[in-house]
Image: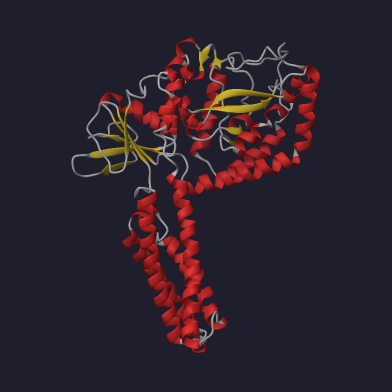
Amino acid sequence: MNQYSGSLYEAVEPARVQTVVPPSRERQRLSAYIILMCIDTALIHLAFSTSALLYHGEWWAPGMMIVAQTLLPVFLTIALYNKSYSGRALREWIFAARQALTALALAAALISFIAFYTKSAATFSRGSVTLGLLMTAAGIVFVRRLFSIAIDKFWGGATTNALIIDDGGLSFNLNQATKISAADFGLDSTRQDPFMLDRLGKLVRNQEKVVVSCPPERHRAWSFLLKSAGVHGEIVSDYANDLGVVGINNYGGKSGATLTVSKGPLGLHDRVIKRLFDICVAGAALVILSPVLLAVAFLIKREDRGQVFFIQRRLGRSNQFFDMVKFRSMRVGRLDADGQRSTGRGDERVTRIGAFIRRTSIDELPQLLNVLRGEMSIVGPRPHALGSRANNKFFWEVDDQYWARHCLKPGLTGLAQVRGYRGATEREKDLTDRLQSDLEYISGWSLKRDVQIVLATIAVLRHEKAY
């Protein structure tokens, strides 16, 4: 660990890094969409019940409520497809109102068409239905305008987060983007420094777009770092030589164009599905396995009166550090906080109960807490300790692609583990085999594959290399 000492990390105060990290606009937008859908639901019912009261003198008339409840799912379906609930709709209230009114008109036309062919139109008052639709339309416009005012007041008008990293390249500016100097935060794209990468990971947290302006000779290095961080990354440039560009963006004016070099491995929809899967599986596993967890904790404490858990710093998503929890399997005083020595067969540091829980992989179960905290997933590349080596080399010195495996959250299990790539890394091939499996998993993620890996893991809990 000599050449990667903590002083590199401490050169930039963590508190200063935190001042750059914004709140998650993605979560805020999701909340705004849900609130807006709830308001629209209430608005349609309120408008039609008020129309019934004005026309027929009856509040919440059953006939009008049938119209409202038939209209509602059709309206919401069309609205979701025509981007009535989208980032642009939050930014531009006129666009939001236009799209929502279009969805309302199409829904009304479709319902009218169905009512005509089913000969049920005569049972409803055209006047009251028309009034209900007009009141709904007026409410939609009013609510969109109110949302626009609220976003300006509470979010400063910004519905997305963008970060510009100036590393000595072309001058570039973007409205409502945070701009920092790479030098001020100790960001050097040419160094494979885990502390620097951890800092970069923290800086890009919650950023939906990261734009780097740097000299051409550093384009390739920054392109790789942005891909490894798992963010939407762009590089200010006037050419696209061998960068793996997936898009070109022209911002106009003096800002010029950028090249999109990374988009992150999973979209919002897939991330939501994966997170729900993690929460459901981890929560259920903790409840079902609680007797086993309590028994193991008791046996560890009974053997030598030491602490039950072993907490070790590991590399996680976006190359950020996090504290991974395991059951302690080594003797007190022989713990390896940095993981510089791989555990071998017959390792004298391992306790009696530790040998058993390592063979059966029970020592890994407390990581279910890391999953619930959002630091890990049930399935993903296994997190490594900072001091881990293969053939006496740090893992990132063995293969330049090592950092790319951290664009997803690390997992409790993974594709490499079910293929038998686990245990000590004595040879470089021990690492590269795992790395290739990790990159294959990232490029081909699906919920079905996660379920398959979880089921396959059960068969390899006890393994000849688990010691």
Residue lying farthest to the front in this orientation:
153
Residue closest to the eye, 202 or 389: 202
On screen, residue 444 versus residue 160, left or right, reads: right
Residue 25 x/y as whole percent = 43, 46
Residue lying farthest to the bottom in this orientation:
122
> Residue at coordinates 49% horizontally, 73% vertically from top-left?
46
Above-or-below relation of 231 to 321? below
Q: Quadrant of the C terminus?
A: top right
Report how many numbered discs are placed on residues in the image: 0
> How are the residues colored?
secondary structure
Q: Is residue 300 visible?
A: yes
Residue 440 x/y as whole percent = 51, 34
Residue 33 x/y as whole percent = 46, 56
Above-or-below relation of 191 to 181? above
On screen, residue 150 versus residue 73, left or right, reads: left
On screen, residue 362 versus residue 452, left or right, reads: right
On screen, residue 107 versus residue 250, left or right, reads: right
Residue closest to the eye, 210 or 410: 210
Residue closest to the eye, 44 or 352: 44
> Residue at coordinates 45% horizontally, 15% vertically from top-left?
7
Residue 321 x/y as whole percent = 52, 26
The quarter holding residue 11 reads: top left
Q: Is residue 89 visible?
A: no
Residue closest to the eye, 56 or 80: 56
